[in-house]
Amino acid sequence: MLSKIDVIVNPIRMRIIQYAAYNQPVTVTQIAQAIPDVSKATLYRHIRILTENEILSIVGEEKKRGTFEQSYALNLDKINVSGQESNSELQSLVYTILTKLIADFTQYFNGESANPFEDKVFVSTNTLDLNNDDYDDFTKEIFGVVEKYIKLPVKEKGETRMITIVSSPTSQARMED
């Protein structure tokens, strides 16, 4: 079995997880329609990895044209990191994602066709001073916007883009404690 981090940070598996999160239960046919740039053989391989690592669970099976089509749902208990005992696991996940972002941007900027303006590359860092209730409202709104756009069908001439949202306390806030 792969580590949870190795399973989740793969770009294709991330896309499958995100699609399943907003549309579960899902079938391979539905995922293939939502992610048409990935072959069905590749999707089956990644779904097998997600299932073997208990990120996806088979929740149904339906006979279609002489074959059985399985339905999958996320195993949220396996994805969510919570509790003090998971600090090192969450730290590893954050560092892995940040390292992958650095590698992706290094590869992008070192490429001959890098055009940040045409490709709409941006970075935004904002510091907010919110109580927990306001912060919860903020994150619900952010993820509501993400959900709205992630559910849109893939469009011809569409461009796959990675949006990463990171939240952390400021070092100043930690020093005042």
Image (spheres, helix red, strand yellow):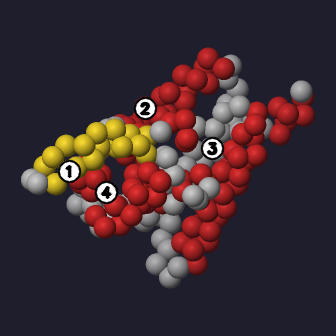
Marks 1/3: CA–CA distance: 40 Å
Closer to the chain start, of discs 4 and 1, is 4
Amino acid type shown at disc 3: Val
Q: Quadrant of the N terminus?
A: bottom right
The residue at which mark 1 appears reads as 68
Q: Residues within 10 Å of mark 4 (few under 14, many from 20)?
A: some
Closer to the chain start, of discs 2 and 3, is 2
**Element under label 4?**
loop
Q: Quadrant of the C terminus?
A: top right
Tag 1–tag 3 contact (CB < 8 Å): no
Name the residue at the left extreme.
65
Residue 109: which quarter of the image?
bottom right
**Element under label 2?**
helix
**Element under label 3?**
loop
Residue at 47%, 39% in the rendered image: 75
- In the image, residue 145 lies at what x, y percent? 42, 35
Marks 2/4: CA–CA distance: 21 Å
Tag 4–tag 3 contact (CB < 8 Å): no
Would you say 149 lies left or right of 174 here?
left
Task: Pick the residue in front: 152 or 129.
Answer: 152
Task: Judge whether 143 appears above or below 17 on screen.
Answer: above
